[in-house]
Amino acid sequence: MHQYTLTPCQKKNHWTSLKAARRRLEEHQCLLQFISVNEVPGLYQLLSNTAKEGWGVEKTDDMAHLALDGKYHARNYPLFHKELAVLMYELGGGTALHALNKSPFMLPSHHTIAEMRRQQNLRVTVGDVKISDIMENIEILFHDVDPGEQGCVGITLSQDEIAAEGRLCYLEDTNEIGGLCEHATAHLKTFKMGTNLTVIEAAVKYIREGKIHVGKEFSVAAFSRHAPTDYGAKPVLMLPTCKKSSWQSSAQNLQKLAWAWRISPFGEAKHGPLDTIASDRDPTRKAALYLVCMHRSLGVNDPLYKFLMNLPGLNLFTGNDFVTMDFDYKHLFKRLCTLLCSKMGMLVNGVIINKTLLAQWLEKLSGHDWSDESIHVLLNPKDHQDVPRAVKLLFLIVNLRQLDVSELDPSKRHTHHAICLLGDMFDALVEPFINPTLSLSEQMMSLITFAHIVCAMFVKHDGAFMSNQLYGDRQCMVKNELHAPSS
Ligand SMILES: [Zn+2]
């Protein structure tokens, strides 16, 4: 049998190879040990970089140590991680995504996924609100919306503010600085970046002097169609704001929006005329709404006149093209509850109905399950924006009408009578918004009942019943409901 013998030189080479193999094995074991007992951030991305960059085991181990110390961030996110981050952002918001970005999973940040989340490249307002910007956004959002068989429908323009990050940004398409408030136009000649730092330096100077501001909120205006399909609000104006603008400029912006819708081939011509401008309780915009929507009275030649002329007490003032204003009914429910839950309360037929009185009467309600929420919690809410709680309280007051008062003394009966009147009023107000079985006529009759009760009480008690603003807002809401279906 042939025996294989190694020369001394071969022996030495094999020995060296064995030593190297053992060392590599040891490095592998070290790396495996390190990543299995430590929460290395972004491990998936790090190992992916190992293959991509051709790192050895030693280099990978070094990078894993750096990653654990927060000195290395692998950012080659696979598509799956980006999609997961978008989902987390939609479900849990910016805070949840930030937490996951800082966790060992190291999901992409809000900025990384911004491009993916953007479905449309809408124009953000820089400087003055421009009709051309609004028209471009209308085209982007409405050009492929099918008007359907019904053709033109009524359109609502709504406006409200949303929170922003409060930082400036560079708008690549137009080479401009974005994010400055509406005051910037009065101080900066241009927002174009140009080839030097002049514009940036001027902006920084005025911001430090407090003459212009970085918008902490965006004022967003959106059009929505009163149609069975594709009725969601589509935002056509995104204006960075410091919320210190005047009601005159707010009115101008509303008129620009209305005009842009009117002249855009993808606006009124395709989808129908604007008939309502809706808002929250923002006082500046409310003043602007009165200017835009209450400056002409219906005349005998107007088509709506014959329908509305026989409604005594109805304010027949509208804006151009019969545009009326509306206020979010949920806001009105909440404001009514806030008033009831205050010490001042509402004066009804000589009885002050406030939280103290309501607590005493709600106790008498039989058959109501108070296990999940006490009367105290209902009347002393931590969150004044809680709409279901507001509707619940209004309905409990409606239910107080059913109480048996035959055993009560005349004074208590007088109080109960006042509560019943308030219950009738709330029933007429809330029912059209929550009962889908009501016909359009029944909804109208209910809201007109509400308008008459609230008018009678306001004439009798003035500000002790409710504030002028609250009264005005709810009559506007009822008037808008009367106007909208007829157009
Ligand atoms: Zn400002």
Image (cartoon, rainbow, N blue to C red):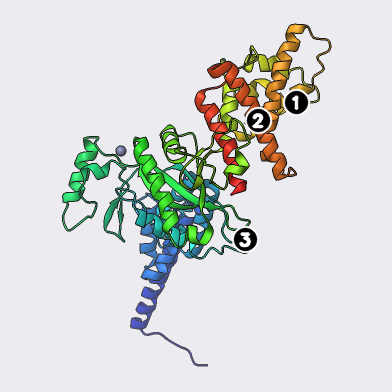
Q: Is residue 82 shown to the viewer in this render? A: no
Residue 243 at x, y percent in the picture: 37, 36
Helix or strand or loop: what does disc 2 sit on?
helix
Looking at the rendered structure, the secondary structure element under dot 1 is helix
* Amino acid at pointer 2: Phe
**Marks 3,1: beta carbons within 8 A:** no
Spot occupied by residue 27 in the image (x, y as percentages of width and height): 41, 63
Q: Is residue 80 left or right of residue 391?
A: left
Q: Amino acid at mark 3?
A: Gln
First reached walking from the N terminus: tag 2 or tag 1: 1
Which residue is labeled 3 in the image?
A: 150
**For mark 3, does the 10 Å Cα neighbourhood hold few (<14), some (14 to 19), or many (20 or more) residues?**
few
Q: Nearer the viewer, mark 3 or mark 1?
A: 3
Q: Which of the two discs, 3 and 1, labels the residue nearer the N terminus? A: 3
User: In the displayed structure, does residue 409 sit left or right of residue 233?
Assistant: right
Tell me what residue is drawn at x 41 percent, y 73 percent: 18
Residue at label 1?
Answer: 399
Image location of residue 407, percent across then percent down: 83, 10
Q: Residue at x 64, y 34 (%)?
A: 388
450 shown above or below 406: below
The verdict on label 3 being within 8 Å of ligand 1 is no
Q: Residue 450 got which mark?
A: 2
Tell me the crowding category of disc 1: few under 14, some 14 to 19, or many 20 or more residues within 10 angstroms, Cα based: some
Check disc 1 and give the amino acid type.
Asn
- The quadrant of the picture showing ligand 1 is top left
